[in-house]
Amino acid sequence: MRTRQPKYQALAAATCLVLAAVIAAAAPALAAGERYLHVRVQDAQKGENVNVNVPLSMAEKILPAINHGPLHNGSVTVHQADMNGIDVRAILDAIRTAPDNEFVTVNSKEQNVRVAKSNGNIVVHVRDQRDKDQNVDITVPMTVVDALFSTAQQDQLNVAAALQQLADTGSTLLVIVHNASQNVRIWVDSNPVPRND
Amino acid sequence: MILLGKIVLGMAGVTLAGAGLLCSEGFVQVKVEQKQPQGHHVNIIAPAALAPIAAHFIPARNLQDASQQIRPWLPVIDTAVHALREQADFVLVEVREPNQYVKISKAEGAIVVDVDDPNETVHVSVPLRAVGSTVDEIADAAGPQ
């Protein structure tokens, strides 16, 4: 009986070692986790509800394979003519180095628009003055915007890099569009099935 | 007698190997249940490996158009199929309307489409491995690229 005890101890120690090794191996995978880009459109009047859930790692792999129209190797070409002469990179450089602040405020009879930098995010709020129920809120992490403009080409947006950065950023509510009948939400989290809230 | 036994054993082995090969890519399932009192109930389960084989035997002229349309998208389809296979199960699209429910999901290595409307329920499950090889067969139908 006495001779068996060390055997059990050795067995228990070996089991603990194996468990520790498994947990150590799994930890980075668990920490990294999969992120999903969720799009939800709810139409209360029609009683419709549409959910689209895309794993970001999957989108990152597929996007560079698409070479069609303005999309090539994960980048979108935006023609200068579409930019109306605005140097977006210069504006972003200015915003990046600036402290948190409200950069644009437009109050008109039709709409109130506010563009700000807040806690490392670019925030856009649009309130429709005629239809009080119509709101648009956009929050984009600055790191994602930087990734989007990370290509050497002046007329390209690096969508693949932006997706990768979005996956690294964590759970983020990106877009809310709300009006009398419809709600649109676009967000990123680690749930494969969106919550019903 | 021993020779006969060997022949039977060989044939059984070949049959078993053939069945294994045929089932290696999983099964395509198409299930349609009509909700009317006299409605049809159809449930087809076929080895997915048959899909690319069937595509191979379709006369090339019938696939010419599909082949030419699919060719530019082959790298995207291949990448998408591989990326999907690596993913854990998830719901890609879910649409709920007052009278209809549609769900497209990835489940156990297959793309699954479920539709439920007042007339019928439809369930289609296609293994991803079969999708890739069938698309390759269709793309090959127009001859060498």
Image (cartoon, coloured by chain):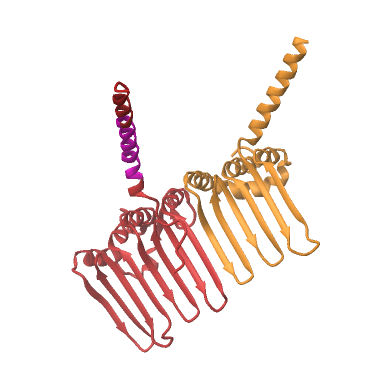
Chain colours: A red, B orange
> Is residue A78 at all visible to an observer of this figure?
no
Q: Residue A2, located in which quarter of the rendered image?
A: top left
Does A115 lie within the magenta span? no
The residue drawn where x is 74% and y is 15% is: B5
Residue B104, position as x, y percentages in the image = 57, 56
Q: Residue furthest front?
A: A1
Q: Residue furthest top?
A: B2
The residue drawn where x is 57% and y is 44% is: B128
Residue B117, position as x, y percentages in the image = 67, 65
Q: Residue furthest right?
A: B38
The residue drawn where x is 30% and y is 33% is: A17
Residue B46, position as x, y percentages in the image = 69, 42
Residue B32 higher or lower than A130, as above or below: above
Q: Tag count in the figure?
A: 0
> Is residue B121 at all visible to an observer of this figure?
yes
Does A21 lie within the magenta span? yes
Residue A138 higher or lower than A69, as above or below: below
User: Which of A11 and A29 lies nearest the eye of the viewer?
Assistant: A11
Describe residue A112's horizontal placement relative to residue A192 as left or right. left
Residue A69, position as x, y percentages in the image = 48, 57
The span shown in magenta is A13-29
Q: Examine the residues drawn in magenta and state their main secondary structure.
A: helix
Q: Quadrant of the N terminus of chain B?
A: top right
Q: Quadrant of the C terminus of chain B?
A: top right
Residue A85 higher or lower than A73, as above or below: below
User: Which of A162 and B67 lies nearest the eye of the viewer?
Assistant: A162
Q: Residue A75, located in which quarter of the rendered image?
A: bottom left
The residue drawn where x is 35% and y is 37% is: A22
